[in-house]
Image (spheres, grey):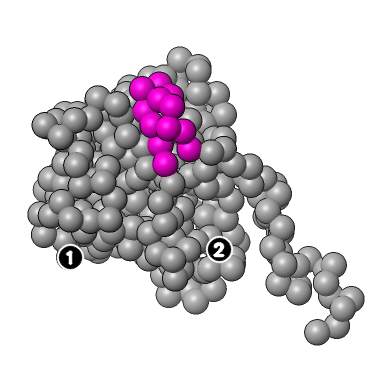
Amino acid sequence: MDSSCSSEVEFECLPLFRVFKDGVVERLRGTETVPPSDVPQNGVVSKDVVISPETGLSARLFLPMTATPDRKLPILIYIHGGGFVIESPFSPLYHPHVVSLASAANVIAVSVHYRRPPEHPIPIPHDDTWDAFQWVAAHSSGQGPEPWLNHHAKFDRVFFAGDSAGANIAHNMAIRAGTTQPPNVKIYGIVLVHPYFGNNGPDRLWNYLCPSGVHNLLFDPAVDTKLSILGCGKVLIFVAGKDVLKDRGFCYYEAVKKSGWGGAVEMVESEGEEHVFHLFNPDCDKARALIQKFASFMNQD
């Protein structure tokens, strides 16, 4: 390859990332990390686990100190956002957010570190998250490799949730679970926060991250005839009033209601707020309200 191409940009999506013609990916934000903590933070301890040494799939686990062998807790499988490309469970945005969720809802959280595009094109993030779910489910007999799940997890009450791109993945996990779900495991519900289901027109980012072009139902589930097989009993959708993705969130809500699916779907709008505002301003009243609604959803029958 001509060395003069090494500094030429092939694709960029500002302010997230750019890709150079020599294949180098430069992530412009979302690369910072914070460690897990065995000292309780808001009543929650955390640790990192490797799920697949072969692929590098890993997760950060969060355990409320209220857990005992006699009091098993629901499981939240959380999928971070960031346009599929940036951020991780270990970032200073997502670590405290999932701590807050685990604490408020009193659940064990598994925050998935999926492989990210463009090095690992879509649907690899979706496949990795499904593999993480299979790993969690393998503990339902009490014989898995992770003691926190063996001793404290309630496998008949599992939730998928995510924000933005992570919400896209969470929805698609429920679609997969509609046709195949591990024994002794029940997906109770999904929570989609400001879901990324594209814009009302060609989506340059999605087309670049999913070059095969054969996974458009992952991108726009409102046109998916399989919505009726969602493998959960209830869905909660959050949208933000000033978010450019809000309209597609509404479309998803309406499509699920009309699909013939037999569960309950609810939508909550945070008026006057931007996309994922709760991550950047977690102490504001509307962010606190989002966390509390999220937690109550997971604790309702």
> Where 121 sits versus 71, above or below?
below
Residue 5 included in the magenta stretch of the image: no
* Disc 2 crowd, CA 10 A, few/some/many (<14, 14-19, 20+): some
The boundaries of the magenta stretch are 36-47
Amino acid bearing label 2: Pro
Q: Secondary structure at mark 1?
A: loop
At x 56% / y 47%, what residue is drawn?
87
Question: Looking at the picture, how far across and down is residue 138, in whole percent?
Answer: 21, 59
Residue 9 image point, x, y percent: 78, 66
Residue 220 relative to residue 298: left or right: right
Outermost residue to the top: 285
**Residue sitting at 36 percent across and 37 percent down?**
62
Q: Pinpoint residue 131: horizontal percent, then vertical percent.
A: 33, 63
* Residue denoted by label 1: 180
- Tell me if label 1 and label 2 are in contact, CB under 8 Å: no
Q: What is the distance, in whole Å, between disc 1 and disc 2 at their CAs?
A: 26 Å
Q: What secondary structure do most residues of the magenta stretch adopt?
A: loop
In the image, residue 291 sits, relative to residue 257, either above or below, namely above
- Of residues 139 and 86, the one nearer the viewer is 139
Q: Is residue 294 visible?
A: no
175 relative to 276 in the view: left or right: left
Task: Return the residue found at the far right.
Answer: 4
Q: Is 26 left, or right, of 254 in this rendering?
A: right
Location of the C terminus (image quadrant): top left
Q: Please name whichever residue, 120 or 189, is drawn nearer the observer in this view of the structure.
A: 120
Q: Residue at x 11, y 31 (%)?
A: 70
Q: Say if the magenta span includes residue 41.
A: yes
Residue with the mark numbered 2: 117
Residue drawn at x 64%, y 47% as measured from the top left: 31
Q: Position of residue 115 (x, y in %)?
A: 50, 61
Tell me which amino acid carries mark 1: Thr
